[in-house]
Image: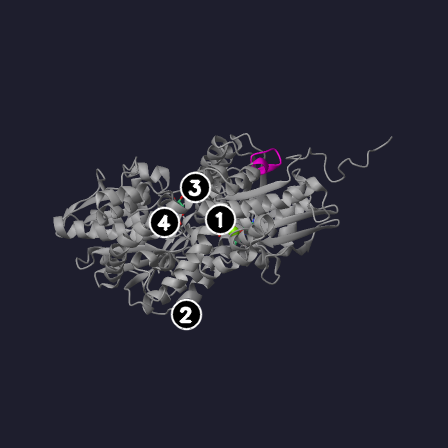
């Protein structure tokens, strides 16, 4: 059978049994199968004998239930019935769902004394920031990864951590959001607001005083004095704890460049998803982050590429004129169906080939589109088998 | 025989959503919100009406779709609707809307500009997304309320290409959001005014979905959430439906040999694979998938809301495709 794309084969099992690999990050644009792939890799790695922790983000409800994640409790739970003992060790799987607000709260609690923490946690602006700032989820996924890794190192718990990334239009958000939040909290306006507290004698003081005057004037007119007060508390509190945040984000970012980390980029065989995958691959190279390869997910399955779309359509047309042949109508329908699948497959093959021409060194694994959603351990096992199969 | 001129000429279907002026289009990411919002604007503008299509996320998706230059913060004609009628478009920007607002109510445009230069507007709308939302929805309500004054720049319908399902309730429920921040004062009053349009029969929130498990689940959850917050739900647009190619059921009695024989009668043979079996397997895979689609469609229909079924456009969505989708909407009673 003709392979969809002629690219180096991404050997999933070789990656999963490599003991030097400690972190695998599954990334890609929205809806391509990041969560499914992360979970399937987790199951497979545990079956190969590794002790694995999978960090999932917003998994589909039934998939979460299948892994025994009924509540969002922000700590890894052992998934029963997964894992084998091999020469690599005693395989096991822990899984968790990220609770971004709780993770943010814990960071605040870790970096501020109790009074200050309480002040921040009840501040309405903090509450808005921690539950809906665009990028908080990415930032907190990164934070949680850092925490899991330290826990793994300190307690010898997991030898492999697999991370899913948040749904986002652009896969790059995972890498960029923490910096965006950082530069926001570090921005000009915050500096102006906090300057008086830092001592008005310095150069920025006069401008700050003036800026603050205008700001207070207009805002109290629109919002009322209480709101202003809240902004002030928020900014002061964040300013004194943020150094800690930023340092930790930097540490985690460095962890991503480590040779013990591998990125798997997931894409659907569609133009938008492959374009995003391309950007991401470029970015990884630029930032010296290790790429394992590309997973092309939900590819049109086809078992007879030798029967072309044109041949099938022509034959269907001829069969429709043959009342003398038994099952002629059904066969004609099936030929039309095959023609349509071949057209889709051919289009996907062109798109994949184009990606490969642009990134010739990038290894690829393909996973066919299953007829039904993946929502139980059997489905994850099946995806794992398909991921590891050598079909391109 | 007499016929009333107001009777609908296109279809006997009763109009969906009579009295609705503000149509909010949401749905899971990537299901076709922007596409559906644009087609809906074309359908609602048809027969000499004026519709305004609003974008609130600064992505210029509308300009791309209609193949026009990036939209400024200014209402512009982007397309002509079937049978006469105009689709206008506007990309709303929270900063600009705030400056408008400061000028309109306080005559404070200069101070507003100074704040913007300092990064203050960006800062405030970032840490208080509720404030940004009230500015965006506030603009939509300002446009809708023009019709109360029979203003010459009024529209028959306003359509928002809105944030996805996960954020839609928060986006629309500005009252609740702002009340956490401002207990009284002008912003609070403004939020009340906005709610008087959004939580009223003048508004309908529509959800776009695909016939797949996750988008359908998000739709069902989204409807419950909107209802729990007393926001008016309109209909469900089921997008990218693929036609069922195999008209006869494939049951066990169908034999690979018979299919192989039918194939060879028109000269299709293979020495290496059992073609009959391959085609049967493909047919079975296809019917499992269509069975899944029908199950999901059933879940959608169980909501009891009007369902508009939109076909998958094999050639992708271009202007012609938008008119095609708009026609399907018209045939389903959108006007
Ligand atoms: N190979 C496959 N065959 C069939 N269905 C699949 C396959 N891979 C994933 N799916 C299904 O596609 C849907 C989306 O997958 P998933 O949730 O893993 O994507 P995601 O990239 O994590 O999405 P998001 O960006 O929203 O987080 C799920 O319903 C999943 O069961
Ligand atoms: N009926 C259809 N047939 C074929 N393709 C479609 C159809 N509707 C939408 N699409 C395509 O699907 C993709 C997503 O559509 P669109 O951008 O409208 O979704 P969206 O929900 O607005 O996405 P986002 O969440 O990114 O804003 C686009 O490439 C669009 O051309
Ligand atoms: Mg996901
Ligand atoms: Mg869109």
Residue B288 in view of the camera: no
**3D distance between C-alphas at marks 1 and 2:** 44 Å
Sequence-wise, the earlier of marks 4 and 2 is 4
Query: Residue at 50% of width from left, 31% of height from top?
Result: B227
Q: Is residue A251 left or right of residue A302?
A: left
Q: Nearer the viewer, mark 4 or mark 3?
A: 4
**Which residue is more in the foreground, B259 or A265?**
A265
Q: Nearer the viewer, mark 1 or mark 2?
A: 1
**3D distance between C-alphas at marks 3 and 2:** 53 Å
Query: Residue at 56% of width from left, 42% of height from top?
Result: B24
Chain containing mark 2: A
SS at badge 2: helix
The C terminus of chain B is located in which quarter?
Answer: top right
Q: In the image, residue B280 lies at what x, y percent?
A: 46, 45
Q: Are marks 4 and 3 in contact (CB under 8 Å)?
A: no
Query: Residue at 43% of width from left, 40% of height from top?
Result: B213
Q: Quadrant of residue A257?
A: bottom left
Sequence-wise, the earlier of marks 3 and 1 is 1
Q: What label does residue B261 carry, if any?
A: none
Q: Nearer the viewer, mark 3 or mark 1?
A: 3
Residue A265 in view of the camera: yes
User: Can you identify the residue that label 4 sits on?
Assistant: A232
Chain containing mark 3: B
User: Can you identify the residue that label 2 sits on?
Assistant: A357
User: Can you identify the residue that label 1 sits on?
Assistant: B132
Q: In the image, residue A62 lies at what x, y percent?
A: 35, 37
Q: What label does residue B181 carry, if any?
A: 3
């Amino acid at each position: 059978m003709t392979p969809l794309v002629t690219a180096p084969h991404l050997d999933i099992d070789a990656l999963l049994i490599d003991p030097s690999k400690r972190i695998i990050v599954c990334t890609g644009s929205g809806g391509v199968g990041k969560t499914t792939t992360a979970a399937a890799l987790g199951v497979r790695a545990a079956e190969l004998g590794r002790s694995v922790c999978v960090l999932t983000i917003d998994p589909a409800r039934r998939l979460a239930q299948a892994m025994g994640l009924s509540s969002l409790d922000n700590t890894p739970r052992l998934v029963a019935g997964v894992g084998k003992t091999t020469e690599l060790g005693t395989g096991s799987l822990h899984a968790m769902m990220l609770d971004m607000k709780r993770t943010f709260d814990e960071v605040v609690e870790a970096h501020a004394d109790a009074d200050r923490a309480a002040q921040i946690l009840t501040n309405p602006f903090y509450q808005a920031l921690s539950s809906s700032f665009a990028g908080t989820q990415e930032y907190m996924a990164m934070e949680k990864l850092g925490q899991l890794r330290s826990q793994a190192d300190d307690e010898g718990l997991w030898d492999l951590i697999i991370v899913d990334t948040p749904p986002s239009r652009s896969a790059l958000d995972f890498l960029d959001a923490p910096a965006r939040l950082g530069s926001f909290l570090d921005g000009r306006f915050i500096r102006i607001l906090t300057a008086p507290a830092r001592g008005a004698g310095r150069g920025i003081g006069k401008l700050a005083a003036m800026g603050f005057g205008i700001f207070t004037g207009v805002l109290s007119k629109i919002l009322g004095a209480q709101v202003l007060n809240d902004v002030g508390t928020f900014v002061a509190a964040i300013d004194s704890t943020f150094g800690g945040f930023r340092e930790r984000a930097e540490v985690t970012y460095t962890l991503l460049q480590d040779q013990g980390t591998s990125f798997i980029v997931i894409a659907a065989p569609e133009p938008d998803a492959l374009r995003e995958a391309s950007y991401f691959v470029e970015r990884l190279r630029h930032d010296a982050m290790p790429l394992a390869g590309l997973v092309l997910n939900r590819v049109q399955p086809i078992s007879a590429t030798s029967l072309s779309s044109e041949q099938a359509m022509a034959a269907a047309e001829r069969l429709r004129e043959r009342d003398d042949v038994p099952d002629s109508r059904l066969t004609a329908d099936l030929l039309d169906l095959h023609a349509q699948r071949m057209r889709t497959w051919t289009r996907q093959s062109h798109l994949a080939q184009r990606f490969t021409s642009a990134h010739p060194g990038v290894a690829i694994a393909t996973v066919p589109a299953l007829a039904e959603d993946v929502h139980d351990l059997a489905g994850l096992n099946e995806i794992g088998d398909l991921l590891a199969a050598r079909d391109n | 025989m007499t016929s009333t001129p107001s009777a609908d000429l296109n279809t006997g279907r009763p109009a969906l959503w009579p009295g609705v002026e503000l149509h909010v289009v949401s749905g899971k990411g990537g299901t076709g919100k922007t596409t559906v919002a644009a087609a809906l604007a074309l359908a609602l503008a048809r027969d000499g009406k004026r519709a305004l299509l609003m974008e609130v996320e600064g992505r210029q998706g509308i300009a791309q779709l209609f193949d026009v230059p990036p939209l400024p913060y200014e209402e512009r004609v982007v397309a002509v609707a079937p049978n006469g009628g105009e689709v206008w478009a506007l990309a709303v920007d929270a900063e600009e809307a705030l400056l408008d607002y400061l000028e309109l109510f306080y005559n404070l445009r200069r101070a507003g500009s100074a704040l913007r230069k300092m990064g203050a507007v960006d800062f405030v709308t970032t840490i208080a997304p509720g404030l940004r939302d009230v500015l965006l929805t506030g603009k939509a309500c300002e446009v809708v309320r023009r019709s109360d004054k029979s203003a010459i720049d009024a529209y028959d319908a306003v359509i928002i290409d809105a944030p996805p399902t996960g954020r839609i309730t928060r986006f629309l429920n500005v009252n609740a959001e702002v009340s956490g921040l401002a207990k009284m004062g002008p912003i609070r009053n403004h939020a009340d005014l906005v709610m008087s349009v959004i939580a009223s029969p003048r508004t309908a929130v529509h959800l776009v979905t695909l016939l797949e498990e996750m988008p359908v689940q998000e739709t069902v959850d989204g409807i419950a959430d909107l209802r729990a917050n007393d926001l008016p739900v309109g209909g469900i647009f089921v997008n990218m439906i693929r036609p069922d190619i195999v008209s006869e059921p494939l049951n066990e009695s169908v034999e690979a040999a018979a299919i192989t024989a039918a194939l060879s009668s028109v000269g299709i043979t293979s020495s290496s694979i059992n073609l009959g079996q391959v085609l049967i397997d493909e047919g079975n895979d296809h019917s499992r998938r269509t069975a899944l689609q029908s199950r999901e469609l059933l879940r959608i229909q169980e909501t009891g809301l009007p369902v508009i079924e939109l076909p998958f456009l094999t050639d992708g969505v271009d202007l012609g495709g938008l008119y095609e989708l708009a026609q399907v909407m018209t045939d389903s009673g959108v006007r």
